[in-house]
């Protein structure tokens, strides 16, 4: 359920973008939807609400969700203040590439990479599988970041907005399936085999 809730800000971004040119009225207040700029403002607000709701429901804040919130609000603010959609369009690339760098660098610092540090208390896997899993995520982050730029610069803004919604869902499902496929054969092994 939590993963579905994480797509809500992106879904709202997509919905508001589709309302471009429509006027939304509430009492004496009205607003004409201004394409990617209105969608960006909604994305920012929805992300902040998502962070607050997560904290209210769990009394915990995930670092990943906070970093997403900072990126959305930072790039979103630049988009709105400078009236330049390239900032919000570059956000997925910069965010994913930063994650790729962090996950990749973690292979060289300490005994465990970031993937193992994050999930190692929940499941026990051989060290070589943790390395392979971490590398898979690094490749994922860099690939998703690069594909975002291909769509942002090679297609229309409307195509990029649609891509942002559908690719977020599709790529998450692919990464989840790939991770499960890599981890599943080792779940029945004893924790003592963790140091292969």
Image (spheres, helix red, strand yellow):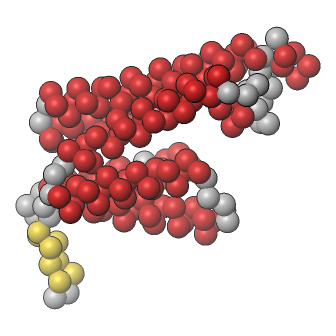
Q: Position of residue 26 (x, y in %)?
A: 21, 81
Give the residue at the far front of this rendering: 109
Whether residue 143 is visible to the viewer of this picture, yes or no, is yes
Position of 130 with respect to 172 (left or right) is: right
Residue 108: x and y in percent read 65, 22
Residue 179 in sight from this viewpoint: no
Q: In the image, is residue 128 above or below residue 94?
A: above
Q: Nearer the viewer, residue 107 or 85?
A: 107
Taking 153 as reference, is 96 left or right?
right
> Number of callouts in the render?
0
| Quarter occupied by residue 115 | top right
Seen at 46% across and 24% down, the residue is 140
Residue furthest toward the bottom? 28
Residue furthest left in the image: 21
Quadrant the C terminus occupies: top right
105 left or right, relative to 16: right
- Would you place residue 27 above or below residue 165 in this image? below
Q: Residue at x 50, y 50 (%)?
A: 67
- Choose top left, top right, bottom left or bottom right for residue 187: top right
Q: Position of residue 59 (x, y in %)?
A: 67, 65
Residue, x 55% and y 47% (percent of image)? 64
- How far across and down, in percent of the image, does residue 100 sit? 49, 29
Left/right placement of residue 114 relative to residue 82 reads: right
Q: Is residue 91 above or below residue 187?
A: below
């Amino acid at each position: 359920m939590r993963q579905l809730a994480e797509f809500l800000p992106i879904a709202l971004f997509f919905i508001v973008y589709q309302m471009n040119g429509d006027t939304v009225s509430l009492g004496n207040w009205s607003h004409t939807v201004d394409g990617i700029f209105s969608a960006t403002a909604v994305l920012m607000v929805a992300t902040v609400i998502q962070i607050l709701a997560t904290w209210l429901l769990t009394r915990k804040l995930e670092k990943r969700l906070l970093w997403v919130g900072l990126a959305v609000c930072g790039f979103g603010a630049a988009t709105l203040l400078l009236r330049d959609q390239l900032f919000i369009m570059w956000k997925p690339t910069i965010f994913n590439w930063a994650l790729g760098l962090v996950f990749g660098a973690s292979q060289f610092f300490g005994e465990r990479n970031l993937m193992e540090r994050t999930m190692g208390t929940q499941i026990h896997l051989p060290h070589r599988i943790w390395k392979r899993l971490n590398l898979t995520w690094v490749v994922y982050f860099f690939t998703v970041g690069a594909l975002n730029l291909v769509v942002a610069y090679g297609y229309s803004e409307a195509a990029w907005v649609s891509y942002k919604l559908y690719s977020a869902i599709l790529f998450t499902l692919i990464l989840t399936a790939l991770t499960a496929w890599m981890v599943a054969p080792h779940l029945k092994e004893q924790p003592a085999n963790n140091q292969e």
